[in-house]
Image (tube, helix red, strand yellow):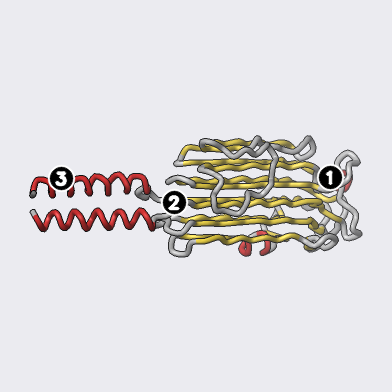
Amino acid sequence: MITFRKSLLATAALLAAGIASAPAQASTFASAILDINNFRLLHSSGTAYSTADFTILQGTNDAHATASLNQVFANGTSSIPILIGTPNVLHQCQGAPCPGLADNDFTKFANPPPVPGTFGYADQDLTGASISINGNPAGAHARTRADASTALNAIASGNSDVGTSTTFRFTLGAADTMTVSFDAAAYTQAFVSNGSGPDANANARLSWSINIIDLTTQGTVFAFAPPQLNALSVRSRTDGMPGLLTYNFATVPGTPLSMVSPLLTAGTSYQITIQHNTLANALQQELPEPASLAVLAAGMLAMSAALRRRKS
């Protein structure tokens, strides 16, 4: 009995000490925001392509926004022909409560801690066009965001894209190169609090690319995927390396990201695909809450006191 009582007291003391050292709130957070502006397809002369330059021009603008929390999903999709309009999927959120962001709000959250809640969130918006349509100036503006936050034990994710499978078929009336030109602002952030449970992690990344394929040969004739919007954007934190990691990139005004294609021949059918994606994931494993630890420690101390009274 004496040995049991000593063991009980020691355990209670260790739990009480653990309460003092346990984090007030284990949490994880990830965010990814990509803003592509003044995206244009240009002739070798520097002027924008227009519908008059194509003998065939067919395709769609697609967009998706998906949020999830503990494998419960909120989804939104839209697909609109390129000559008719652009998609705008309503922002998607899974959580309680969701953050107080309006649709098409791409404002960054304040740097954690504290994290802004427990939710998955995604949003996208696309306006304008990469070529001149019906005499309107060329210049597309595409924005996406994905956020995942766990103030409580949870698995959260956000995933949004615009232009993924913005794929269209075209044939030029006259041979020319095609210059891709745009401004970009890219942001990713990952955070894991000190003392988070095993396998807790936060990951944020972007991906952006454009490809042109010769539909006769099925060969790729042009590909552009700037590292600033792909591999360099990846940010990740784990329970083994907690803390905050942030990536910020923006083109200098007047110095867009750009690349020139090889000569595209007249009468050849090509397919162009623009892929634009933001992704965020956050995971927080189950941990004993400090309040639960306190109750357990108090109960064990009470049992020890009762044993002492019986002994006396």
Residue 55 is tagged as 1
Q: Position of residue 51 (x, y in %)?
A: 86, 44
Does the rendering let one see residue 165?
A: no
Q: Label 1: how many residues lie within 10 Å, few (<14), some (14-19) or many (20+)? A: some
Which class describes the residues within 10 Å of circle 3: few (<14), some (14-19), or many (20+)? few
Amino acid bearing label 1: Thr
Query: What is the spatial separation of the Cα atoms under label 1 and label 3, in whole angstroms?
Result: 91 Å
Name the residue at 91% across, 41% down: 135
Q: Residue 282 versus residue 218: which sits nearer the camera?
A: 282
What secondary structure is marked by label 2?
loop
Instruction: Check residue 24 in the rendering and tell me which mark sits there, or answer none.
Output: 2
Which circle's residue, 1 or 3, is located before the other in the chain?
Answer: 1
Q: Are marks 1 and 2 in contact (CB under 8 Å)?
A: no
Q: Amino acid at mark 3?
A: Ala
Labelled disc at residue 306: 3
User: Residue, x 31% and y 54% (percent of image)?
Assistant: 16
Residue 100 disc label: none
Residue 268: image location, x then y, percent: 78, 53
